[in-house]
Amino acid sequence: MPPSIHPVHLITVLRQKSLTPVIVFLTSRRSCDEAFQAFESTTETLPQARQDVITNVLAELTAAYPSIQDHPLRQMVTVHGVAAHHAGHLPSWKIAIEELMRRGCLDAVFATTTLAAGVDFPARTVVLTQSGVRRDQDFSDLTVAEVSQISGRAGRRSKDSVGFALVTPSPYMDLGVLTRGLTGRPEPVDSQFIISYPMVLNLLKAHPVDHIQSILAKSFAQYQMNAQAATLEHRIDKLQAKLESYQPRECSDWLTQWSAYDHATRQATQKLQARRHHPPEVRARLPFLTPGRVVAFSRFRGVVLRRYRSKGQHHEMVTVLRNGGTVAECPVADITGVVDHAFDFAPAPAFPWAAPEALSWLEQQLGELPKQLPAIALPPPATDDGTGELVKSLGDLFPCPTCPCRPTCAKEFKAGNTVKQEWLHHTRTVQSLRTGLWHKFQERADTLHDLGYLDPTYKLTDDGEWARLIRIDFSLLITEMIRAHAFDAITPGALAGIMACISYENDRPGSFPRISPAMAGLIATTRRMATSLAPHDDPPLLRADVGGLAERWVGDTTVTWPQLCRSTSMAEGDIYRLLSRTLEYLSQVHQLRATHPDLASIAAEALSRIRRGVLEELP
Amino acid sequence: MTRDELERALAELPFRLLRRLARTIAGPPAMRMGKRRIIHTIMAAAETNQARIEAAIRTHQAEQHAIAAVPSTPAEAAADPKAGKPADLGSFLEGIGVPEPRPFVPDDWQVEAVDALERGDVIVSVPTGSGKTYVAVEATRRAMREERTIVYTSPLKALSNTKFTEFSKVFGPESVGIITGDRRDNPNAPILIMTTEILRNLLYDAAGGEIDVRLDTLGLVILDESQFLGDPERGVVWEETIIFCPSQARMLLLSASIGNPQELAAWLTSIRPNPCHLIRHQRRSVPLRAGYLHPNGKLTPLFRTVAMPPSPSQAILHPEAKRLFTMYEEDASYGSRRSG
Ligand SMILES: Nc1ncnc2c1ncn2[C@@H]1O[C@H](COP(=O)(O)OP(=O)(O)OP(=O)(O)O)[C@@H](O)[C@H]1O
Ligand SMILES: [Mg+2]
């Protein structure tokens, strides 16, 4: 669907208005490819002279990047002067497109918004077809920084006097977001400091533990947290000043004293609450509402079967048998009169609270009662609402009930307590801002101690000494696997495969049908290990298919790149990235030459096998 | 609210909110719909979601209220962009083309940045495509004259490769080396190119006692695309690199504009031996204009003025762009028919 303007039409319009070269930003790799493919059916081609220039540039680049030679898209790029550029392509192909663009050979490139920052890839015009971008399975708006990164590619220094950012609508378009992006200030950069296991090991290798806090204090994270803390401390000072007006009275810390008293009062009151809930005339009725009592409601009469209190609201309720035979739950407050008449019956412990025969008997009796019956004259309600009783009972525990300050305290407590609670809250926050990093560090260090990488004085153990050389994500998983001898006598292919599994965090689908039984077993072991480490470190995705792919590439050196690509539905660029990440991981294992010579040499072998074909084109 | 009232209120909501609402009620397919169809989808599920829909409408209305209540400052009123006629296409497209060739003269900020490195660390925060590479190259030239080692780091291997080629062209291939996880090409060259992770690892090793001789003579560390410091996964590596960078080396942080470069500079100043100098501006070296291109090929300026409005609050849409966009939003099938 996007771009909603047909790509060929779009480029034709821009060519007419001299707005090329242009980069068209699209939502997905697929839409880039589709837009590019749309030119296949057009008859409009570049003049021969321009085609020749492209041919020459590509030939020039082929020397350094042989994979360009037979690239399937080469012909179309040359003939139409347009290209797609996204992460599904090989780096060498992307380099070729970038170079063609830099030299002004192309009229249009369809790219995704992930087009890397800093890659020199300018044009006269950029076209924005979307205001959102896919992030972690969801769509979110482009940030100001992202929009300015995109629009910043419009207008080449010394080649253009002016650059254009064109917006073309699509279903993914919110003009407000783009307007803000084009005219607003970029977002601030905030620290993303995290304390990782390799960081802990490497810091403790180089510094005694009592220096660590001062090193962590140098982080931007701490700098920003200090700024926050300073703002809060300013607030705290103000709150402190406010608290002055709640000076000590009879007791030195009356806020705490009163708060405890208040709490106790509340608890004790809860028991009284039900009674206090009702107006006095209702409360006066309560003693009479025993099972069998006849009561009148505004429109019917009934026999009380039981009295209870509703859960949560503490309303006094009665279950009554109405004339007519229905059993109903009624609030006591609805009773209009207590009749001077009660039946004797056998109550039951569960609904309907009376034996069946008693129920029908009661129903019958109720029907036979005369219309007019004397009502009970209720005693006048007691004036004490229970507080007096309460004060008496708490008086032994707290001075407050009899303290001369009591009225003032009662009046000022609420305001004073709000200030105090805020003060407490901020004080705690400041404390965690000041010491949070150090606590996190200690937490990590304790885990490393439990696992045996650090001794009780936080010095590196023998295992810690080599484990600190693994400085990648999931380092803990890898070092634990090594310690468990899971990689002993492993083949270079399987080592590459398992490293690929651990390193690859992309969940973009792509399947590879075959994985060896050895590989499958290894993945299962790794998964078990990752699960057991889950309390300390998030487990990796461990995709079996990518493991199989890397295993095949390293295990069988006769496999060619096109063969490898054909065996999976993954994009070429993704396979390249997978192997290149695997390479990083293997090179870390290779660092363990001194302590694990066998494993290191297997890693070296795997490394040299990965490095062939397109993987040799770039350092 | 009655159904009619609800439908009318929904029509008042911006597209963005409608889409969000539709997504929470009816799921992701709503992404591809136009305004009318989205309202339709929402109305279809209105019975069971009435409260949620009304809440969204109320929130929006409250927000609008709050925005309307803010009085415009006199300064803004004076520069009312509504004054005067909206720009026409002629003036919008005026001046397209290649400028007169001029001899290369470095911009003032570029010179200033290179000079400031003599005195301490430098952060350069200027728009994309301004010429930060020039600063990196000149600073490298000076450090080489003093026989110092220069490390250039970038977040991406692809970028490292480009810079490797670029630096090799300027300083000769014998002067430039590149280090990756498993390869060291020309590692004794005075200029070393690597990813930031590799440099961090070298700094770890140096701190751990395995001194790489090269770090002794380290004179300049260039961190390109240093806004990566804010990257959720990798940002920590930039922080570590800055914290562990030897004190005798100068740091040059290059970045496309970020919101808080002064905060970064203050941080560097607080932990490094010399004060950090901030070079910052938002001027684009080639002026930028924003346009709106309708699916039928009609082009109009996006804003009332030809020049880019200086802030979102002053960005008033061109009436024609607004009209065409509303037309598109109200009939999303238009676009899909064309591209069909
Ligand atoms: N003073 C100058 N006068 C004319 N052209 C210049 C000047 N400085 C740099 N340029 C040119 O500007 C272009 C962009 O420069 P460069 O790649 O350094 O930008 P950048 O700031 O690094 O952008 P990015 O944010 O994309 O990394 C280059 O082609 C360069 O030759
Ligand atoms: Mg750059």
Image (spheres, grey):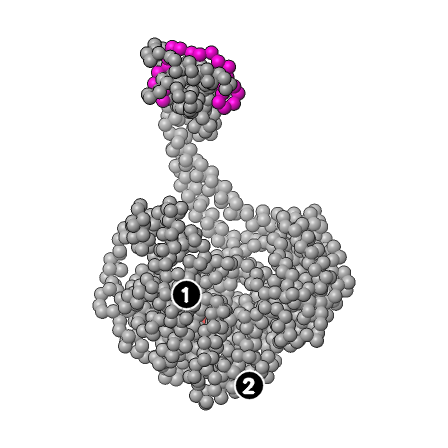
Query: Could you tell me residue A221's position as x and y percent?
Result: 52, 54
Q: Which chain letter goes with mark 2?
A: A
The residue type indicated by label 2 comes to: Ala
In the rendered image of this protein, does residue B60 appear above or below residue A318? below
Nearer the observer: mark 2 or 1; the answer is: 1
Query: Could you tell me residue B340's position as x and y percent?
Result: 41, 71
The quadrant where residue A591 appears: bottom right
The quadrant where residue A66 appears: bottom right
Secondary structure mostly seen in magenta is: loop
- The residue singled out by tag 2 in the image is A59
- The residue singled out by tag 1 in the image is A130
In the rendered image of this protein, does residue A178 appear above or below residue A401? below
Q: Is mark 2 within 8 Å of ligand 1?
A: no
The residue type indicated by label 1 comes to: Gln
Residue plotted at (30% across, 55% down): B12
Q: Which residues are magenta?
A: A334-354
Magenta segment includes A337: yes
Query: Could you tell me residue A544's position as x and y percent?
Result: 65, 61
Residue plotted at (42% across, 84% down): A44
